[in-house]
Image (cartoon, rainbow, N blue to C red):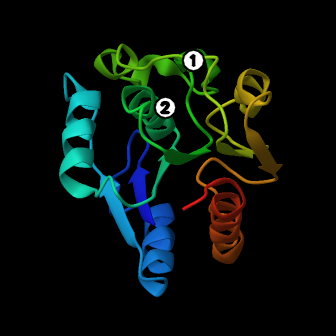
Amino acid sequence: MQYVYIHGFGTTGAGSNKFKKILAHATENNAKAIALEWNEHQPDILEQLTLQLESEIDWSEPICLIGSSTGGNFTYQLLEQFADKKIAFVLINPLLNVEQRKIDNYNFPMLLANQLKNPSEDLANGLIILGENDEVLDYNYTYQRLHKNNRIITGKWNHTLSNLETACFIELIQSFIENNFNE
């Protein structure tokens, strides 16, 4: 399995605690974990992520994209771009639209906001992990738009899932992949 992590706004991929958990799990299981990097100053983030993805992964091996917050938005954009490939996906408190943010948007860069895309109604068969105590995004916004065709797990977690035990976090992802993604 190749785990590909796409971080959210204001963080980095390799430095993310979520990626560190994914990397540790991958290392223990002879799998590969990759963190794609982007920043809000790039004029075409999706293109940069696509180039990184194509240079880092082996399409003959199973792939799981894991996107957190704004990285969740880019995750489903990548899924649409690679619709002909079999890719499992996990969205963690995904930012579907700037309007779901609970905090002032004046600090959210317009260059970045203009690169976000609403998910297709065809976005299906993924795992969506939503924190009911998310202090950044309205989790109900995501739930209402994605619950029909995806497996959604909610809990009393915050935006970064820092209050979700590592074992639980990895177990949610691993269980989903084992039950829904035939290698």
- Give the answer, above or below, for where 149 lies relative to 1: above
Q: Residue tagged by mark 2?
A: 76
Residue 85 is labelled as none
Residue 120 is labelled as 1
Residue 79, image x, y percentages: 45, 33
Residue type at tag 2: Tyr
Sequence-first tag of 2 and 1: 2
Label 2 with label 1: CB-CB less than 8 Å: yes
Label 1 crowd (10 A; few <14 / some 14-19 / many >=20): few
Q: In this view, does 156 lie to the left or right of 169?
A: right
- Give the answer, above or below, for where 87 lies relative to 103: below
- Give the answer, above or below, for where 17 lies relative to 101: below
Residue type at tag 1: Ser
Decide which of 113, 124 is in the foreground and name it: 124
Q: In this view, does 35 lie to the left or right of 3?
A: left
The residue sitting at 74% across, 54% down in the picture is 157
Distance, label 2 to label 1, CA atoms, is: 8 Å
Quadrant in which the C terminus appears? bottom right
Label 2 crowd (10 A; few <14 / some 14-19 / many >=20): many
Quadrant in which the N terminus appears? bottom left
Decide which of 125, 105 is in the foreground and name it: 125
SS at mark 2 in the image: helix
- Give the answer, above or below, for where 53 lies relative to 114: below
Q: In this view, does 145 lie to the left or right of 113?
A: right
Quarter of the image where one finds residue 93:
top right
